[in-house]
Amino acid sequence: MLSNWIQQAKNMVVFTGAGMSTESGLPDFRSSNNGLWRKKDPNKIASTEALNNNVDEFIEFYRERVLKVKEFGPHKGHDILADWEKKGKIQSIITQNVDGFHQQAGSKRVAELHGSLQKLRCQSCGKEYDSEEYINKEYHCSCGGILRPNIVLFGEMLPQDAFQFAQEEAVKSDLFIVLGSSLSVTPANQFPLIAKEHGAKLVIVNQEKTEMDRYADQVIPNKKIGELLRELDMELFS
């Protein structure tokens, strides 16, 4: 069924969440067994308040995350999505992930809703740096300001450009596939509904149930994303 829908689609959009990244080896945040937020309070280490009032712990936490992102990389699923974009099969990717793996795999039209750990920016002047600065234990800008990851912290708005691009892509889509997201974080979880409301078929691929499953045309649980994409790639292009 899904391979037929992909074949027929003129505007396929893919939405990826933490499940896409965990298959690369990165820990996620919200899983019931070992999500990072089970062990740490996000408001104390991943918020604007932490950046302003608890900067040492904030930097230590994000340096660890930057090191993890550098340790791992895209998996076969990322490569397949990038290849499908080259072939004109995917119009765009909307991602909640901050690892930058989609771009590393070669995807070009990516809306990073929550920013990227591949870059840092100065909290004072906004100048951008590569995240290597954190690895080298360099935490200050040339202006003296604190370097922070170029991601959305708790208490911040989503980047307007990425949000608007994602909204436009969801509206235009005729097939919207969710890969590895619990769809529990607003406003990001509204994009599948926007796509559905504008006539797209909605497919949700996630290990656990999501609150949006009832709106989906197809739900695929308990399936590895890389494995599913390999099977679909074989059906479509071999």
Image: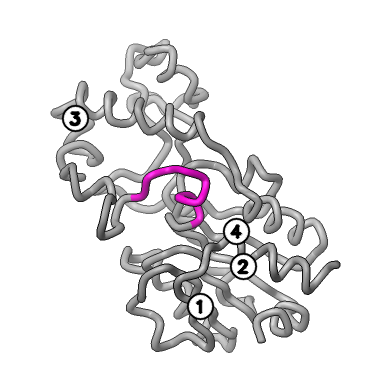
The CA span between labels 2 and 4 is 6 Å
User: Quarter of the image containing the C terminus?
Assistant: bottom right
Disc nearer the start of the sequence (1/2) = 1
Disc nearer the start of the sequence (4/1) = 1
Tag 4 residue: 226
Horizontal side, residue 207 vs residue 13: left or right: left
The CA span between labels 4 and 3 is 39 Å
Tag 1 residue: 220
Residue 27 locus on image (x, y percent): 37, 45
- The structure residue drawn at horizontal position 46% and vertical position 44%, both measured from the top left corner, is 98
Q: Is residue 40 above or below residue 197?
A: above
Q: Is residue 184 above or below residue 64?
A: below
Q: Quadrant of residue 18?
A: bottom left
The amino acid sitting under disc 1 is Ile
Q: Residues within 10 Å of mark 3 (few under 14, many from 20)?
A: few
The amino acid sitting under disc 4 is Gly
The CA span between labels 1 and 3 is 42 Å
Q: Is residue 123 above or below residue 45?
A: above
Tag 3 residue: 52
Magenta residues (range): 20-28
Res 228 label: 2
Horizontal side, residue 8 vs residue 57: left or right: right
Q: Secondary structure at mark 2?
A: helix
Residue 115 locus on image (x, y percent): 45, 44
* Figure colour scheme: one colour
